[in-house]
Amino acid sequence: MGQYIGLDFSLKDTAISIREDGKRIWRGKCPSDPGIIAQTVRKHADDPVNVVFETGPLATWFYHALMGKDSGRSALRHGMLRKFWVRL
């Protein structure tokens, strides 16, 4: 079964949590750079199913950067990245 990745963006660092079969298999932080985020996810999740993150001021920028909308190259597998809308 694949892994589910949760991202919590900030200007400086991004917190990452990876879960499989309902159990956390890795949790950590990395610099908030789309390339480094993708590299970190690939290092700790060999079969990622979905990536979720809550909406916020940085969400749109990170979504487009990770999907390669500006560069034409996707940092994460197409279709894996989904926005998770949190209603307050």
Image: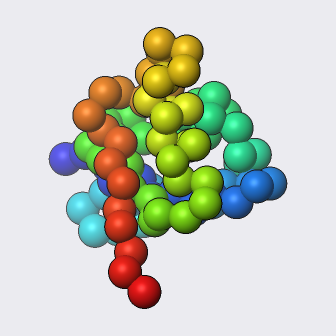
Instruction: Name which residue lies at 36% across and 67% down.
Output: 85
Left or right relative to 85: residue 35:
right
> Can you say whether 54 is above or below 80 in the image?
below
Query: In this picture, is 15 found above or below 66?
Result: below
Asked if one can make out residue 43 in the rendered structure from this viewpoint, the answer is: no
Q: Nearer the viewer, residue 72 or 19?
A: 72
Residue depicted at 42% across the width and 86% down the height: 88
**Residue at the extreme bottom:** 88
Q: Quadrant of residue 45?
A: top left
Colour mapping = rainbow
Give x and y (percent) for residue 77: 35, 27
Q: Is residue 32 left or right of residue 4?
A: right
Tag count in the figure? 0
Residue 11 seen by the camera:
yes
- In the picture as drawn, the residue positioned furthest to the right comes out as 12
**Residue 30 picture location, percent across and down:** 71, 48
Q: Which residue corresponds to the image point at 71% horizontal and 46% vertical from the top-left?
A: 32
Spot occupied by residue 52 in the image (x, y as percentages of width and height): 38, 56
Residue lying at the far top in this picture: please name it. 72
Q: Is residue 76 above or below residue 56?
A: above
Residue 87: where, in percent of width, then height?
Answer: 37, 80
Q: Residue at x 24, y 62 (%)?
A: 21
